[in-house]
Image: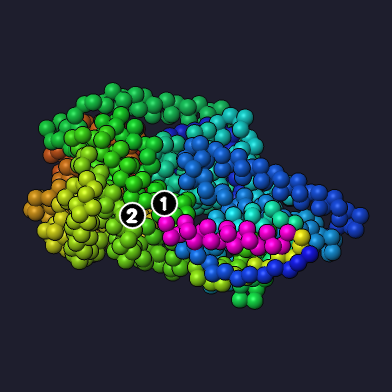
Amino acid sequence: MAVVEQSVTVANKLGMHLRPAAEFVKVAGRFSSEITVGKDGQWVNAKSIMGVVTLAAEHGSTLTIRADGDDAEEAVAALLECLIKKRKEADA
Amino acid sequence: MSGDRLLRGVGVSPGIAIGQAVVIRWDLPEVTRGAVAASEVEAEIRRLHAAVATVQTLLEKLRHRTAERAGPEEAKIFDAQILMVEDPDFLREVETLIRENQLTAERAFEFKTLEMRALWSQSTSPRLRQRVVDLVGLQVRVLNQLVGRAVESLLHHEARRRPIVFTRELSPGVTVQLEMEHVAAFASEEGTRISHAAILARSLGIPCVMGLVGGLDRIRNGAEVILDGGRGTVLIDPTPAELAEAAEREQRRQALVRELEATVGQPAKTTDGTTVALRGNLDLPDELDGVVEHGAEGIGLLRTEFLILGRTEMPGEEEQARFFTRVAQRFAHHPVVVRSYDLGGDKFPAAFRPVPEPNPFLGWRAIRVCLDRPEIFRTQIRALLRARRHGDIQLMLPLVTGVEEVERTRELVAEEAAALRRAGIPAAPDVPIGVMIETPAAAMIAEELAARSDFLSVGTNDLTQYTLAVDRGNARLAGRFTSFHPAVLRLLKQIVDVGRRADVVTSVCGEMASEPVAAFLLIGLGYRVLSVAPPALPLMRWLVRQIAQDGAQQAAHDALAVSSTAEATRALAVGLARYVDLDLVDVGRLPADAPEATLNRHA
């Protein structure tokens, strides 16, 4: 059991709009850990599309991913990768 | 006699349909049952899951069908709702509400979505605010499912014989969800003949009545009805005699249609030898075949908004160039006039819906958007320049009010042409630029605009709306929206005269040109190029071949001489009645206040 937390800047030019949010939620759903994602002190369940969309994370805002559970390490890594991958797409 | 069985609206797409009413209620039901006994809580939760599963299946089905019929991009409008309905976290919260407060499934769901809506609508993020539409859509579907009122009745009644669909409003979003080809006719409480859905119904040849204020509550699901898209009426529970009369009327209409078919391939020339060029307006790509089959001499108005509607991102240069090329190749010897994005008002892509404006039709739209967001415009210009290698592609600017807009567009075109040349991308060095005359401002400075343009084209809907200060989408004002108002007539005359003097092609591409009486007027005023919705092409060709130019000119002269709309309308109707049976060519489209007796009895 571990709690892992890491912050990242939203790279997608359009922010965490529906599509990237959906992918983010899908990735989060693969892990058993409890995962929350926060922005400016507002925390939501990373496995809920409604929650993640509610964050309205614009391009350049900072998201913090926090996972609590057996696969916390992997979960945070995968979610970070998901956001970084988006960055590559946006740069391309 | 038929008294309260007869509903009156505005006929927006002609034809008579006899069929069964399917009432689609796209609104939120009232949730009356609030609480349940503790013992029923688990049953409520099962009910919630069952309803959600049904809605989920339905949405998947809709997405699949839309993808098949309209393409993957259009199908994306369902993505948001599908994702939301699948959200386990959200459902768990609804479950908790049911469990802890002993609420009914519908009350708990309503509560939770309202909470979400409040949160999202207050957000500073425009992107989040625009998701509210999807949330409400989901709320409508799930709640209706829970209270036992099916929303997508049409899908549940596939077996129903010739469904006639009744809805509150036919927004582009709703129309795309309906299976147009299986629908015998449409009717809605809101909307007018200029609404997007009305134009769509006309282009698909489906009878449609709009502006049936209060009609939805008077029609029960499954009732037999006669819908007359010419007269703008709906008759509920018709008697055998009424059914026979409707069938006979439809037969006469179809006889005319057959006569029209025989005209295809014949020149659009008046009996005294004046030739009129008939072009087609293209709204959706799948209408292209129809335009070609009906013998259109090019495209007078290629709308590009469909490229965007229902999409999340702006279409790229490649996609647009491919589409424009495809259209141009179908018309080897005729122009294809592409209107730059006419965004704003009721049309905006999901990609960049702006802050809602109090007066969208006087707001940020059309050429204003194109020039303020040049990156969008430049992409379109590059696509046009590339496609022009394959045909006579021309660019038309909507809602122009000043010469600067034309001059600025010329600069953009020159810059993009140079950029393409530098990049070694094959493209035409230039593209003819025309101005849509659809504001009184443009009409007043038509001479200056003509001096800077390659052609003029009158957009009659907007010109009428802006001249008369009548919102074309307001059902209550439908009777006041008429292009036969003396002010509009005089502008139309002024514009065609300027065009003749400046020696630039001056066409009419507004909906008006598809109406027989209006087309008669336009020819009489001196317009020689009319662009109409594809299904109207045969009627227009037939009409031109029935009339004499000198008679049209006389009628136009008479209409210009009088001081009221009613007198002008009468002058034109009387003039046209010398050549054709007005009852047959669908006078249902004339203004409601025009004296019917005069119009109908001149055959």
Assign the N terminus of chain B to one quadrant of the image: top right
Residue with the most extreme bottom position:
A41
Q: What's the chain of the residue with tag 2?
A: B
Q: Are marks 1 and 2 on the same chain?
A: yes
Residue B331 to residue B401: above or below? above
The secondary element bearing badge 2 is classed as: loop
Label 2: how many residues lie within 10 Å, few (<14), some (14-19) or many (20+)? many
Identify the residue position indicated by label 2 in the image. Answer: B341
Whether the magenta-drawn stretch holds residue B11 is answered as no
Tag 2: residue type? Answer: Tyr
Gap between marks 1 and 2 measured at Cα: 9 Å
Principal SS element in the magenta part?
helix
- Residue B463 lies left or right of residue B60; in this view the side is left
Residue B65 to residue B338: above or below? above
> Is residue B567 in sight in this rendering?
no
Region of the chain picked out in magenta, as a range: A71-92
Whether the magenta-drawn stretch holds residue A83 is answered as yes
Residue pictured at 89% horizontal, 57% vertical: B37
Q: Which mark is residue B308?
A: 1
> Is residue A31 in sight in this rendering?
yes
Q: Are marks 1 and 2 in contact (CB under 8 Å)?
A: yes
Q: What's the chain of the residue with tag 1?
A: B
Assign the C terminus of chain B to one quadrant of the image: top left
Q: Which mark is residue B589?
A: none
The secondary element bearing badge 1 is classed as: loop
- Residue B10 lies left or right of residue A45; in this view the side is left
Relative image position of residue B496 (x, y in whole percent)? 15, 51
Relative image position of residue B155 (x, y in whole percent)? 61, 38
- Residue A2 lies left or right of residue B15; in this view the side is right
